[in-house]
């Protein structure tokens, strides 16, 4: 996802579409080479070593490409562990990942221009002949419009671009007569029916043979698509129009981009992840620069570079300003809500955002590019590869790594922009890790788990299309490439399109004067390149000074001389640094020290407070170092407390008529009050407290006296709520989440922490229920008035004698019908528990209910087990909640209105409706967590 065609000159004012060679040439004049991570200074890499590494890249490509051709061709991809081809329909389905496969020899087409970049012109000519002879684009198969565009259409156009270049040179491809372009045009027409929507946004999938909506097509019923899926078409479609003169392709791609622009959230200027292709409503309202959105931003800037249309640059600048204002928290890039951009939507990042530093280089914003890239490199040094997702404290969230090339891409462009040999060392590390951990006899295998080093039988086509291209170019000198790479722009799949297309068939290249744009106060947002004296200050250690505060952000790998400076300052009488164990969030002096250290507090939607350090905001380098040490101490302290205080989940069991123990709700424990694992369970009827939040003295003590009080989460500490209901005479308390739609099925449980004071005065048990589980109790109260529950460490066996006695004495049919409905409800709860997906690419639910031998009786008495796949420590300060899954699993509350709310003020729903609601919630959660690409 990168660019080879933007110009940056030292003291120049040149068009952005000028040659990239100015970047490397002038940056070398403006920037003295920086030092490496662990040494005082690193000498430039010798020409011999660069050649050796370049040759190593060539050998690695031969290993991957040769095994594909020997063991897999004409299949779409190679399965490197079993040494055979992956053919759609012949292997077990992998879900959306297989939508890239269309029985069109995907890896061969995706690798065409890589062969030329790596100076394998004879192999390229043979490959083109194979494509023309063997590839069929009329297969009865449903494919992703997005993947087919960037991989196949882009591969054909990239191959055509270099084929005509080689033909002009007069040695190779003399027989070529635009055959690849004709195939690209054929494929373009096959994709056009996907745009048959009122909005102009394409359907996410299409049948290559039958198109959309026909019964044989088996597609056309989808309503949603990701922003990147609809917004990553303009380069390939415009190039196809410019090459062929058929303007329809560029028209359709422009219309889709125009619609996305008009649907941006106007106050934040951000776009969501998923949009309804018919109504234009945002389905997922979280926004970031990773999966689902990434290449939309990339193509806005590159469309300006390739097509020369100022409106694309204006749009990109508007979005970029919003990204840097809300999403960028250097060195982190965290998703936010488009309507509430100051509110983080998650506490983890996905690997696809690794392309963004490279895009920032094209933009000319070098400092944050260096910061984010360095942070990512530190994660790689810890895990050998970049996990599919990792948390803000750099722990694994999703452990897979399908050999993604985005980090190599950004490494290449940072080296081109700075000339800093540090990035050559980074590239060398990537090569070593690939050979050491991913190389297998039949190619390179994706990592199933970066923590264990286990492999997956998968080698995606983008590995050959992008990874080897960027690594080779990183170590290649200009004479090592047989053509001028600066004359081309890279697509998101690293396919090469010639910049001369900007002056060809420009009938559609008109400035958009009808759209509204935000007035931006940023001097960098010019339509010509910035002066590199601004980008690269005349400081020999500029790049190193940006990286230095970040180099140990993940691990303590290098000694730091700054410690000696701190020791000297302490001897001179300076105040010692704030330690994590001494920190108090209510101490104004401590908060001021945090600010000085560049540490800021982020208030999360679930009530927690998270600490994030911005080293560049620290008052001095010493303060930045103190801030890093403070953050590491806080993480360790939080982890230690987590291990000491982590409690298993508890159970709330409805035992009164007509439930008789069938309904068991998973509850979060408290770190204070009666410990249900050491004492007998608490049994009693429930009653709502007034005020409902329980944050002041209760006005209805007679209602809760001797009962279990129901209180709502929020507005005060959990311990305060417990004291208020205890003073009113309650024998226990159940706190119900105030985030509507939250559920233990889609969010990890957390335990309620104290308020930092002595909580020994709290003697009653306290449990926490998410909104969905709490609404079941509230609905039962509405239906039956008197509801008795059992608070325990695990569910107890129901009393069959009491149930039979009650059932035999019941003569009210409507009451029996109600029993059946609630019984079905409990079965629906069990059903959801058992069907929670385990694949983290599809969802990331952390709780599951094991099957039980007594399930035929209507409910499972076994307790629900919380499964923690990975520990994530975050620094939580509010003292109110501590996630059982190490406090950092994402709450599935990215959209306030994304899940249907359970109402307890209306008539009970029929079972079909209840089941539909629960299934919709699970599907929504799966969609949120799915790898869109």
Image (cartoon, rainbow, N blue to C red):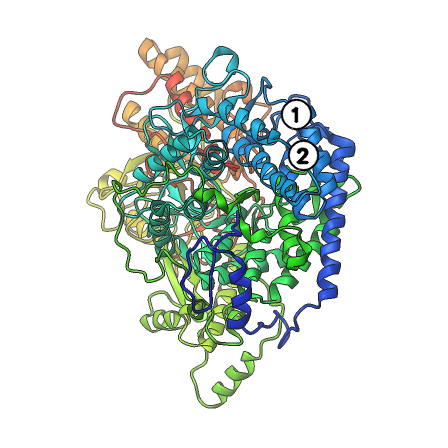
Note whether 334 is above or below 569 in the view shown: above
| Foreground residue among 353 and 583 | 353
Looking at the rendered structure, which numbered label has been put on residue 135?
Answer: 1
Looking at the rendered structure, which numbered label has been put on residue 108?
Answer: 2
Query: SS for tag 2?
Result: helix
Q: Which residue is pictured at 24% across the width and 38% down the height?
A: 703
Looking at the rendered structure, which numbered label has been put on residue 592?
Answer: none
Which x, y percent locates residue 858? 50, 20
218 left or right of 880 in image? right
| Foreground residue among 697 and 568 | 568
Note whether 161 is above or below 101 in the view shown: below
Which x, y percent locates residue 186? 54, 24
Q: Which residue is pictured at 23% across the width and 46% down the height?
A: 698
Image quadrant of residue 826? top left
274 left or right of 381 in image? left
- The reply to whether dot 1 and dot 2 touch (C-beta < 8 Å) is yes
Q: How many marks?
A: 2
Mark 1 is surrounded, within 10 Å at the Cα level, by few (under 14), some (14 to 19) or many (20 or more) other residues, namely some
- Looking at the image, is mark 1 or mark 2 earlier in the sequence? 2
Residue 91 visible in the picture: no
Q: CA distance from mark 1 to mark 2?
A: 10 Å
Q: Which residue is pictured at 70% across the width and 54% down the height?
A: 431
Residue 724 visible in the picture: yes
Note whether 758 is above or below 818 in the view shown: below
């Amino acid at each position: 996802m990168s660019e080879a065609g933007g110009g940056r000159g030292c003291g120049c004012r040149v068009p952005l579409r000028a040659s990239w060679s100015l970047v490397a040439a002038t940056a070398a004049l403006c920037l003295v080479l920086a030092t490496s991570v662990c040494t005082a200074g690193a000498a430039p890499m010798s020409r011999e070593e660069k050649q050796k590494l370049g040759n190593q890249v060539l050998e690695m490509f031969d290993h991957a490409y040769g095994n594909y051709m020997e063991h897999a061709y004409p299949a779409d991809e190679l399965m490197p562990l079993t040494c055979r081809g992956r053919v759609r329909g012949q292997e077990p389905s992998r879900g959306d990942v297989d939508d890239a496969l269309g029985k069109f020899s995907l890896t061969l087409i995706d690798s065409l221009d890589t062969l030329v970049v790596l100076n394998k012109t004879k192999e390229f000519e043979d490959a083109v002949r194979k494509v023309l002879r063997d590839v069929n684009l009329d297969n009865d198969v449903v494919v992703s419009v997005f993947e087919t565009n960037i991989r196949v259409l882009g591969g054909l156009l990239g191959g055509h671009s270099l084929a005509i270049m080689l033909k002009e040179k007069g040695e190779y491809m003399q027989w070529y007569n635009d055959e690849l372009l004709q195939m690209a045009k054929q494929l373009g027409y096959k994709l056009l029916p996907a745009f048959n929507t009122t909005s102009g946004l394409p359907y996410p999938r299409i049948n290559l043979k039958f198109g959309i909506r026909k019964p044989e097509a088996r597609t056309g019923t989808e309503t949603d698509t990701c922003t990147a899926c609809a917004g990553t078409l303009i380069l390939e479609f415009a190039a196809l129009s410019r090459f062929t003169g058929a303007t329809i392709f560029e028209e359709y791609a422009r219309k889709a981009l125009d619609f996305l622009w008009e649907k941006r959230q106007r106050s934040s200027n951000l776009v969501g992840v998923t949009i309804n292709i018919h109504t234009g409503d945002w389905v997922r309202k979280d926004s970031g620069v990773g999966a689902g959105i990434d290449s939309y931003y990339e193509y806005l800037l590159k469309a300006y570079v390739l097509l020369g249309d100022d409106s694309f640059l204006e749009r990109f600048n508007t979005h970029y300003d919003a990204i840097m204002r809300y999403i960028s928290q250097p060195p982190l890039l965290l998703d936010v809500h488009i309507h509430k951009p100051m509110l983080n939507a998650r506490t983890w990042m996905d690997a696809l955002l690794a392309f963004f530093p490279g895009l920032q280089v094209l933009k000319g914003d070098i400092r944050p590019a260096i910061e984010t890239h360095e942070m990512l490199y530190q994660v790689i040094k810890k895990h050998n590869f970049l996990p599919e997702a990792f948390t803000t404290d750099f722990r694994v969230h999703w452990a897979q790594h399908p050999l993604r090339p985005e980090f190599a891409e950004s490494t290449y462009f940072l080296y081109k922009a700075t000339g800093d040999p540090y990035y050559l060392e980074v590239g060398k590390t990537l090569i070593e890790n690939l050979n050491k951990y991913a190389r297998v006899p039949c190619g390179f295998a994706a990592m199933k788990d970066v923590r264990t080093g286990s492999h997956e039988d998968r080698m995606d086509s983008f590995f050959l299309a992008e990874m080897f291209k960027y690594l080779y170019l990183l170590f290649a000198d200009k004479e090592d490439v047989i053509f001028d790479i600066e004359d081309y722009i890279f697509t998101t799949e690293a396919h090469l399109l010639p910049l001369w297309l900007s002056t060809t068939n420009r009938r559609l290249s008109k400035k958009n004067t009808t759209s509204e744009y935000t007035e931006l106060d940023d001097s960098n947002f010019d339509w010509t390149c910035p002066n590199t004296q601004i980008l690269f200050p005349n400081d020999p250690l500029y790049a190193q000074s940006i990286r230095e505060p970040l180099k140990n952000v993940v691990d303590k790998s290098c000694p730091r001389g700054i410690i000696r400076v701190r020791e000297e300052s302490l001897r001179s009488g300076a105040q010692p640094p704030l330690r994590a164990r001494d920190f108090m969030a209510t101490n104004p002096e401590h908060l001021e020290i945090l600010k000085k250290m560049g540490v800021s507090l982020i208030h999360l939607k679930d009530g927690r407070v998270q600490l994030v350090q911005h080293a560049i905001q620290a008052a001095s380098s010493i303060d930045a170092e103190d801030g890093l040490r403070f953050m590491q101490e806080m993480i360790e302290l939080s982890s230690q407390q987590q291990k000491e205080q982590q409690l298993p989940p508890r159970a709330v069991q409805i035992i009164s008529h007509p439930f008789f123990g069938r309904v068991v709700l998973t509850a979060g424990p408290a770190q204070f009050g009666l410990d249900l694992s050491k004492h007998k369970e608490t049994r009693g009827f429930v009653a709502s407290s007034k005020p409902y939040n329980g944050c002041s003295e209760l006005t209805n003590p007679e209602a809760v006296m001797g009962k279990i009080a129901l209180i709502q989460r929020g507005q005060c500490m959990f311990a305060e709520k417990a004291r208020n209901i205890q003073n009113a005479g309650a024998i226990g308390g159940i706190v119900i989440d105030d985030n509507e739609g939250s559920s233990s099925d889609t969010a990890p449980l957390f335990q309620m922490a104290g308020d930092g004071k002595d909580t020994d005065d709290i003697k009653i048990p306290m449990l926490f229920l998410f909104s969905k589980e709490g609404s079941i109790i509230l609905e039962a109260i509405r239906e039956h008035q008197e509801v008795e529950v059992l608070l325990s460490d695990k569910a107890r066996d129901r009393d069959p004698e009491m149930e039979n006695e009650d059932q035999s004495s019941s003569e009210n049919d409507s009451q029996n019908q109600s029993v059946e409905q609630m019984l079905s409800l409990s079965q629906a709860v069990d059903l959801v528990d058992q069907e929670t997906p385990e694949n983290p690419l599809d969802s990331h639910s952390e709780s599951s209910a094991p099957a039980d031998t007594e399930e035929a009786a209507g409910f499972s008495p076994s307790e629900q087990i919380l499964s923690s796949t990975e520990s994530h420590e975050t620094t939580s300060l509010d003292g109110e909640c501590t996630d059982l899954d190490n406090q950092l699993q994402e709450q599935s509350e990215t959209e306030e209105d994304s899940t249907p709310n359970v109402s307890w003020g209306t008539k009970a729903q029929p079972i079909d409706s209840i089941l539909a609601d629960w299934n919709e919630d699970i599907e929504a959660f799966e969609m949120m967590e799915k790898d869109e690409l």
